[in-house]
Image (tube, grey):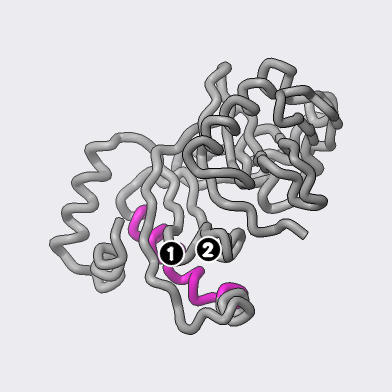
Amino acid sequence: MSFEWVEAVMRKDATVLAHLEAAFAQMQKPIAVRSSAIGEDSEAASFAGQHATILNVTTSAQLITAIDEVVQSALSLSAASYRQKLGVVGAPSMGIVLQELFKPESAGVMFTRNPLNGAEERVIEAAWGLGEVVVAGLVIPDYYRVSPAGEILERRVGDKDIALRLLAEGGTEEIEVPADKANTRILDDDDLQNLHQLALQCEAVYGPDLDMEWGLAAGRLVLLQCRAITTRS
């Protein structure tokens, strides 16, 4: 959704709302509502964690509310402080991405360069369920390192004791993961090779030093987001 469409939704423009509700009804699938602001996910600034993402939107009423929440998140004190630190004046022009919701068995993040020490290697973190538990730091995820040639350098099992579950009525809730599953390795070597191949494909399109979010279900690997790394020390 363009900035102009988002503004029209915020004004409660009847024509735009009717069109949006009709389009959503045709989808007949839960969606994720994500921010797409000017300058977001650029090489200079990712705005990671500053703008809201609303998952498992199942009704048109929830969709309108979710759009409002994403827009309002750009006006938060945290987001304003982030923009001020970067020398960005004023609130951003906010577009919205409406994305079909992928329901992963496991999910996480992958950096195509180590964000802590700059080493040329893939750093992969994984947890059960939705990847937001990794992004938000709610669990100690599994940790893997893979060389640019695809050699597995490290496998470290985390303590993934919390997962996010999708609710039938929309939204999510935190659930406790049984201890035996929480301490079970998520990704096997084939999964790691598939993630390595995904990294190669993304680098061919977007260039090096990428921060990616992914999901995995029934052997199907899905790229959820890809942006430039902005957290290297």
Q: Position of residue 157 (x, y in %)?
A: 84, 31
Mark 1 = which residue? 37
In magenta, the rendered stretch is 62-79
Residue 47 against residue 211 in the figure, above or below: below
Badge 2 is on which residue? 51
- Residue at the image position 38 percent from the left and 51 percent from the top: 97
* Residue for point 52% across, 59% down: 42
Taking the image as shown, residue 74 lies to the left or right of residue 177, namely left
Q: Main secondary structure of the magenta part?
A: helix
Residue 186 to residue 165: above or below: above
Residue 174: numbered disc:
none
In whole angstroms, how far apart are the C-alphas of marks 1 and 2?
A: 9 Å
Instruction: Kindly indicate the quadrant of the structure image that contains residue 119.
Output: top right
**What residue type is disc 1 on?**
Ala
Magenta residue check for 118:
no
Residue 86 lies, in percent from the top left, at 60, 76
Q: Vertically, is 149 above or below 171?
A: above
Q: Which residue type does callout 2 highlight? A: His
**Which type of secondary structure does the marked residue at label 2 adopt?**
loop
